[in-house]
Image: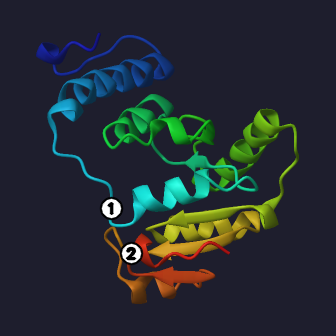
Amino acid sequence: MLDVERGGEFGGTIEEAVTETLEAYKEAARGYLPTADVRGLPGAIELVERFHNQDDVQLGLLTGNVREMAYLKLSQISLDGFFPFGAFGCDAEERNHLPQFAVDRAAKHTGRMFSGKDVIVIGDTPRDIECGKLFGATTVGVATGHFTVDELAEHKPDVVLETLEEFRIP
């Protein structure tokens, strides 16, 4: 445990400090999230449900969150059961490496190989768009975060939307 009273000094390795920090973060979130007023973004729940009901679609999660936190957050809006695999911030230091983790896990889950052309990355940041483009995926920028449609469009995603309500399944 980090000794906060001693100014957060830690005598272990960096890896141990990271592990302890993540555990403290997860513990704090476990206490906070169940009492928070968490809502899905407009169109998010409906879109996930529509994708889930398509036999030719596999839903995977690609996020900078650590695995446990990602599913904890999704559980607050009852979406945690829709993503049987994914790639998480704890898998790689570089977000751009995460799509490969996701498709490897998709292959393990389905017994089918996937490449960039089989993937749609939906995100609300320029980094999400970059990550998908570098992997050869179709990219969808959605202005539901800190970036506007115009700001996301500058990064040349395949599609830019104001909200997920506008998304049409290809």
**Residue located at (31% from left, 38% from top):** 76
What kind of residue is marked 2? Thr
**Which of the two labelled residues, at mark 1 and mark 2, occupies the earlier sequence position?**
1
Give the secondary structure at mark 1: loop
Q: Which circle marks residue 95 in the picture?
A: none
In the foreground, 160 or 165:
165
In the picture provided, is 21 more to the left or to the right than 91?
left
Kindly give the residue lying farthest to the left in the view shown: 5
- Judging by the rendered image, the residue that carries numbered circle 2 is 163
Image location of residue 73, percent across then percent down: 35, 39
Mark 1 in CB contact with mark 2 (< 8 angstroms) = yes
In the figure, residue 86 lies in which quadrant? Answer: top right
Say above or below: 101 vs 149: above
**Residue located at (51% from left, 53% from top):** 49
In the picture provided, is 103 more to the left or to the right than 50?
right
**Residue located at (36% from left, 20% from top):** 23
Image location of residue 104, percent across then percent down: 78, 41
**Residue located at (38% from left, 26% from top):** 22
Image location of residue 13, percent across then percent down: 47, 16
Image location of residue 26, percent across then percent down: 33, 26
What kind of residue is marked 1? Leu
* Quarter of the figure that contains the N terminus: top left
- Whole-angstrom CA distance, mark 1 to mark 2, is 8 Å
Q: Does residue 104 appear in this view?
A: yes
In the figure, residue 5 lies in which quadrant? Answer: top left
Give the secondary structure at mark 2: loop
In the picture provided, is 100 more to the left or to the right than 44?
right
What color scheme is it?
rainbow
Say above or below: 72 vs 100: above
- Judging by the rendered image, the residue that carries numbered circle 1 is 41
In the foreground, 154 or 168:
168
